[in-house]
Image (cartoon, rainbow, N blue to C red):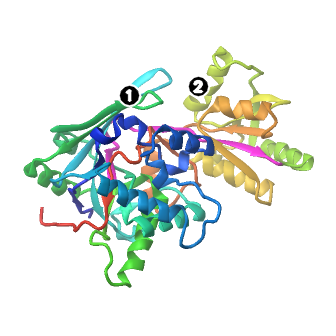
């Protein structure tokens, strides 16, 4: 079962950097090139320079963005821009956010967790991953020997015993980010509370929500380093955020599919293929985000748990399954992705977005030809898929809000002490 431990986190020095909201950033994999530029310009000590550095002319094996990330990290430590806490702690991370006009509050905690293979029965993935990001994160980990973002995980605690122990003893940071989300990081210093949390967590099974690539990278890095001498002292552990899936504060946004680059005959194939599996119920045309019909269309997708489709020529359609068993016990994204693979037997241009309005705009502008809207995946589906040893297609879930990178950092070169 999971072994978790407190640790001495590395945090930004407010006296050196000022506004903390200007030095943190979203996870690397949701940052666009324009956002990368924004965070570079925002503050000279923004974490973007480490987690998603820019490539420069003349880069080679000895000089590249991973080497520069290491230099930034170690220099900022030596200059006091980043400071290491003196007491091993468990960190409480609170977020307050709004979705569709409704305000939510989420509180989990961050600690170290011993790395376990997925075959151990302690840690469960729920989603397939792309191979390219793993190599990118591995090169960063090899260079820096540090975790700059916590892996987002879920556990089940219906009685909320652990939630009741996560007392915010000492506030470290509190601020609002550029999306209007309130973030608060606090520390649990009390050794008795820490011991009790660690003990209760040993009974839990851990489900990875976000961070599959980084978790797999940590496993691979551990195996690489164990074949060498002088490897980092904390190599068996990684930094993890834990959220109780029974707390009522898990928000999963839908991830819609945009399809582009299709020939005319392929468009016709998709139309015929959709007719084989679905009855398309026309929903008209509407352009404005606040249009009542548009909101009704999205509400039908969410509440009826069925997909929808939009084309510039045909407008909006609800995709009603012709056979009850099409979606029975299955993840909607997996069904849709498999249907598209059967129809178009080549790699196609797919863009993912959580914004249905962005999807419509991109089709109207001709950047893509078809938008498929999906209902949000439920947290129970994530749990059931993981426990069954299965995986959803990539980009089946979007846990919101994301955990900020740079809010709390962990140095692998620190020794890890158990026996709590």
| Residue 186 falls inside the magenta stretch | no
- Mark toward the start of the polypeptide (1 vs 2): 1
Give me the residue at 53% from left, 64% from top.
134
List the single residue furthest toward the right: 265
Q: Residue 408: percent from the left, percent from the top?
A: 32, 49
Q: Secondary structure at mark 1?
A: strand
According to the picture, the residue beneath numbered tag 1 turns out to be: 104
Give me the residue at 42% from left, 57% from top.
72
Does residue 45 appear to the left or right of 413 in the view shown?
right
Which quarter of the figure has residue 414?
Answer: bottom left
Q: Residue 8: percent from the left, percent from the top?
A: 22, 55
Quadrant in which the C terminus appears: bottom left
Q: CA distance from mark 1 to mark 2?
A: 19 Å
Q: Residue 187: percent from the left, percent from the top?
A: 20, 44
Q: Can you say whether 202 is above or below 353 in the image? A: below
Nearest to the eye among marks 1 and 2: give it. 1
Does residue 42 appear to the left or right of 257 in the view shown?
left
| Residue 248 falls inside the magenta stretch | yes
Q: Can you say whether 373 is above or below 390 in the image? A: above
Q: Nearer the viewer, residue 16 or 100?
A: 16
Residue 125 visible, this orientation:
no
In this figure, what is the number of numbered marks? 2
Circle 2 Cα neighbour tier, 10 Å, few/some/many (<14 / 14–19 / ≥20): few
Mark 2 and mark 1 in contact (Cβ < 8 Å)? Answer: no
List the single residue furthest toward the left: 192
Q: Nearer the viewer, residue 173 or 269?
A: 173
Q: Residue 182: percent from the left, percent from the top?
A: 36, 30
Which quarter of the figure has residue 357?
Answer: top right
Does residue 351 appear to the left or right of 25 in the view shown?
right
According to the picture, the residue beneath numbered tag 2 turns out to be: 299
**Where does the magenta region start and end?**
240-261
């Amino acid at each position: 079962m999971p072994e978790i431990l407190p640790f001495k986190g590395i945090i930004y020095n407010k006296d050196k950097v000022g506004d903390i909201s200007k030095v943190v950033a979203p996870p690397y994999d949701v940052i666009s090139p324009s956002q990368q530029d924004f965070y570079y310009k925002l503050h000279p000590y923004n974490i973007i320079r480490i987690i998603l550095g820019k490539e420069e002319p003349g880069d080679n094996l000895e000089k590249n963005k991973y080497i520069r990330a290491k230099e930034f990290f170690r220099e900022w430590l030596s200059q006091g821009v980043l400071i290491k806490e003196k007491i091993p702690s468990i960190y409480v991370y609170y977020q307050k956010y709004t979705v569709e006009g409704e305000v939510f509050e989420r509180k989990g905690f961050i600690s170290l967790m011993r790395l376990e293979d997925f075959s151990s029965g302690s840690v469960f993935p729920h989603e397939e991953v792309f191979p390219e990001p793993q190599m990118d994160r591995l090169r960063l980990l090899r260079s820096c020997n540090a975790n700059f973002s916590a892996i987002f995980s879920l556990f089940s605690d219906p009685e909320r015993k652990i939630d009741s122990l996560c007392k915010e003893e000492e506030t470290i940071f509190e601020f609002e980010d550029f999306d209007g989300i309130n973030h608060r990081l606090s520390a649990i210093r009390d050794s008795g509370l820490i011991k009790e949390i660690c003990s209760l967590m040993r009974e839990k099974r851990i489900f990875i929500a976000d961070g599959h690539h980084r978790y797999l990278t940590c496993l691979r890095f551990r195996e690489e380093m164990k074949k060498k001498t002088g490897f980092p002292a904390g190599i068996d552990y990684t930094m993890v955020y834990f959220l109780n899936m029974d707390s009522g504060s898990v928000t999963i946004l839908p991830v819609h599919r945009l399809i582009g680059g299709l020939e005319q005959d392929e468009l016709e194939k998709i139309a015929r293929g959709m007719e084989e599996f679905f009855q398309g119920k026309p929903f008209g045309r509407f352009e404005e985000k606040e249009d009542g019909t548009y909101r009704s269309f999205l509400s039908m997708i969410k509440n009826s748990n069925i997909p929808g489709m939009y084309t510039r020529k045909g407008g909006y359609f609800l995709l009603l399954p012709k056979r009850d068993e099409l979606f029975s016990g299955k993840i909607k994204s997996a069904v849709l992705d498999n249907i598209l693979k059967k129809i178009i037997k080549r790699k196609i241009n797919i863009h993912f977005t959580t914004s249905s309005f962005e999807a419509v705009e991109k089709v109207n502008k001709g950047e893509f030809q078809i938008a498929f809207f999906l209902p949000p995946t439920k947290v129970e589906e994530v749990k059931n898929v993981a426990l069954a040893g299965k995986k959803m297609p990539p980009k089946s879930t979007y846990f919101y809000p994301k955990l900020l990178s740079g809010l709390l950092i962990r140095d692998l070169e620190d020794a890890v002490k158990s026996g709590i």
